[in-house]
Image: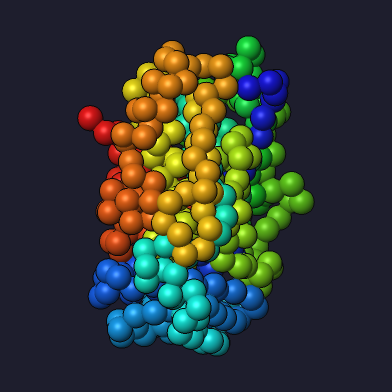
Amino acid sequence: MSYKFFTSESVAAGHPDKIADAISDAILDEILRQDPNGRAGLETIVGADTIGLFGEIKTDAQVDFEKIARETVRRLGYTNPDWNFSDRSTIINNIHQQSPEIAQGVDNEGAGDQGMMFGFACDETPELMPLPITLAHALTKNLDEARESGKLTWLRPDGKSQVTVRYEDGKPTGIEKVVMAVAHSEDISDDEVRKQIIEKIITPTLKDYGYTVAIQSIVINGTGTWHIPGPDTDAGLTGRKIVVDGYGGYARVGGGAFSGKDPSKVDRSAAYAARYIAKNVVAEGLASKCEVALAYVIGRAEPMMKAFDTFGTETKTYDEIKQYIDNLLDTTVRGIVEGLNLKQPIYSKSTAYGHFGKTDLPWEQIKV
């Protein structure tokens, strides 16, 4: 880590891009619930009073796409038509059957597309994730929980966080800045919003990780007031928060997004495999920082590239770490899907607050 300061951001589950991700993953989960071998490449767009569903599927599952979309929007807190986006918004459905040219390669257990994927882990946090993105996710998660639990009744379902961490000799030593944007009702002043967000969200969240931040280094709602949340303010698309979903810019990002894609799509499954490998390398004490790179070509099972970097933090030789990685997980498409048990309806758990660092997901497990 050569930066003296590093910043990462996160977004709340009710951010427009995350609404789109959530709908795509909810539909995918329903397909896999009925048909574990089902395939999907789903894209959702949300805008002013409108939800658009696009993409491809190959499944015998009977899915009520519109019902799932409305239930997801309702779960995320959008039930007020006055915000010009709600569970009663217009839905356009253009989901169609998968291209037979793509299907023929996947049917032979090959990758569903070409591309490169990266996974990363480091020892900065208990989650073996970089500290900036970990804190940013914790802030948005706690923001959502405060609204859902009724602790802060004036919150509305949209928001963002941003954390700047100070580093010395490659190790985090303090929090330099915290920025949050929160949508709120009209019956609370800007000063009171700032006071309560600092007291009930920022201070306890940072304390959980052993940090504090100076009051003058906190920005809440940089433009002052924010009343209307969601897609009426800014349209949302599946896959547009790829850096938020990964490592907050601290590590490399692959060529494709995650949400709405079944595990035959290596954009998703191989990125999870790379994280699994990197995390286990660090957990095993073979390095304090590890990045794993994989690359595939459509229709072929084996990766075209399989590489890793430990950034000079390794405790074993290159060959010893390589042998450990090779024995840890079969990185063919089938090997990843079966080894990590990815044909489950688990993907809605990954949608908000990042796809990595959550202990209940299979690619976050430490192999004993």
- Outermost residue, right direction? 223
Quadrant showing the N terminus: top right
Q: In this view, does 228 lie above or below 191?
A: below
Question: Residue furthest toward the left?
Answer: 368
Q: To which quarter of the image does residue 106 belong?
A: bottom left
Q: Can residue 348 be seen?
A: no
* 84 to the left or right of 149: right
Q: How is the image coloured?
A: rainbow
In the figure, is residue 222 to the left or right of 76?
Answer: right
State the residue at coordinates (47%, 81%). Answer: 100
Q: Nearer the viewer, residue 130 or 158?
A: 130
Q: Which residue is drawn at 45% across and 16% down?
A: 317
Residue 345 in percent (x, y) is at 30, 63
Q: 313 above or below 39?
A: above
Quadrant location of the C terminus? top left
Nearer the observer, 260 or 191: 260
Residue found 51% across the figure and 35% down from its top: 307
Whether residue 90 appears in this view of the structure is yes
Image coordinates of residue 71 in percent, x first then y, are 39, 75
Task: Give 221 or 257, whichever is nearer the viewer.
Answer: 257
Query: What x and y, as percent, mark residue 142?
Result: 45, 45
Q: How many marks?
A: 0
Residue 175 percent location from the top left of the image? 61, 25
Q: In this view, does 227 lie to the left or right of 137?
A: right
Looking at the image, which residue is at 36% across and 35% down?
A: 326
Q: In this view, does 205 lie above or below 256?
A: above
Nearer to us in this view, 80 or 42: 42
Residue 128, quarter of picture = top left
